[in-house]
Amino acid sequence: MRITSSMMTNNILLSINKNRARMSTLEEQLATGKKIQKPSDDPIVAARALKFRTNVSEIKQYKTNTNDALSWLSVTEQAIKNTTDILKRVNELSVQASSDTLTFKNRQNAIAEIEQLKEQIVNEGNVSYAGRHVFTGYQTNKSLIYTSNEAAENFMISEDIEATNLETVQRVYGDQIHDVSRIRLGYNTIKEAAPIAGTIAGFTIIAMDSTETLSSLPPGANEAFAPPVGTVHLLQDTGELIFNEGDTAAIPANFTLDYEKNDFLKGDLRPDHYFNCTNETTGDVFTATNEAMNYQVSYSQSIQVNVMGYDVITADLVRDLEELIKDTKAIVDDGSLADELRKDLLGDKFSKMIGKTQDHIQNNLNVTALIGGKVNRLDLTLSRLSEDNLNFTDLLSENEDVDMARTLIEFAAQEVVYNAALSSSAKIIQPTLLDFLR
């Protein structure tokens, strides 16, 4: 086959262009540090790079979620710890005040401190994280407990009550102490003359105030406000159901009582966080459920970071403190009672508070233990995510990053080849037509 000068020239130019293209590719790899510049350069590398980048991005988001969950749980745990410390102090004061050796002044001081401690419990219940209240479920824009008087709101509340809440308390009528069987509602006052729709099977509910005179009570009522058999007194000014002692065995294990409540005061629980209720002012209906706020912390793992307020600052806790403060103040201020009777009543109030605070403390310790378990789990998850992030980052680098040393050697070698090609080409295409004619 005859090799013409044109063919040689074209082959030389083609080879030089290929050489320059290879040098250009190597130069781009050195400049960017990446093996490919577009998916068509190597579809397999491009596909793997997209997968690894997605994995790294997911891990970073999971780490952000985990850190956020840890912060939320930390705030929650600290609030519960503070509440527990407050309850321990209330317990200490109750132990001290239950002693008959204390004077009325000493007990007044204890009551005053307990009143301040109750205010602090309100603050702990309304603690927030990043502008969101931590104990209020999905309603993070609302506080758990009222921080000011809210006379405008009116709620119809359906409170689920258990017969196990029945207790015997001491009341003074005349100059004697009487035992009264009662179940306490969630609030110390309910709306006066509210329509009552109880479902206590076999019982007739009579709404009244504890201050009503004996002459106004139904036939069969005695000085201890014990209702007749088959009748329940609903004391609207104290939020109590009073049963006849002979009826206690017939109380249903579970029943519901519907009542209205308004004139909410600072320190009252918001009913929409605790009970099935309807805000008759706005028409909103609320159901008391475990409104779990779950954080996705790994590929197939989520964790509930919030604790519902009714599990920590219970309605019984608030009522216990309110009742202790109110009753002890009334006893101390009631000069009509004999001193010995007043001391006995005060001792009984504070003695009962000792056991109640211990129960509340134990409840909070149980909740704290659950939070501690979640924190430990999140710490392990965070450690695992850090390892995964390192592994996938390494895989991503191996997949798309160039080996600089190797690429530099290839570039230098390609440069030598390119220069040699130019030199040899110059000699090959140097002869002209005159050179052939000679």
Image (cartoon, rainbow, N blue to C red):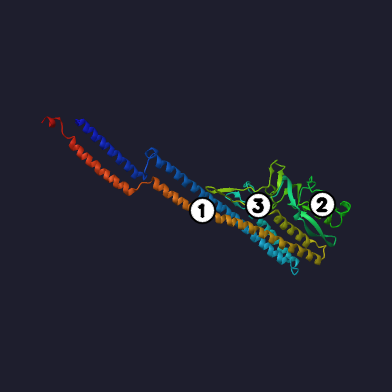
Secondary structure of the residue carrying numbered label 2? strand
Secondary structure of the residue carrying numbered label 3? helix
Q: Position of residue 111 (x, y in %)?
A: 72, 62
| Closer to viewer: mark 1 or mark 2 | 1
Indicate which disc, 3 or 2, sits on the residue closer to the N terminus.
2
On screen, residue 5 above or below 50: above
Q: Position of residue 411 (x, y in %)?
A: 29, 45
Real-space Cα separation, disc 1 to disc 2, in angstroms: 57 Å
Q: Which mark is residue 92?
A: none
Q: Position of residue 116 (x, y in %)?
A: 68, 59
Task: State the residue position of label 1.
Answer: 382
Q: Quadrant of the N terminus?
A: top left
Q: Which mark is residue 233?
A: 2
On screen, residue 339 above or below 201: below
- Tag 1: amino acid: Leu
- Residue 74 in view: no
Residue in the image at 56% along x and 51% along y = 69
Q: Quadrant of the C terminus?
A: top left
Residue in the image at 26% along x and 35% along y = 14
Task: State the residue position of label 3.
Answer: 309
Q: Position of residue 310 (x, y in %)?
A: 67, 52
Q: Nearer the viewer, residue 368 or 75?
A: 368
Q: Nearer the viewer, residue 393 or 184?
A: 393
Q: Is residue 65 left or right of residue 224?
A: left
Binning the other alpha carbons within 10 Å of mark 3 as few (below 14), some (14 to 19) or many (20 upward) gives many
Binning the other alpha carbons within 10 Å of mark 2 as few (below 14), some (14 to 19) or many (20 upward) gives many
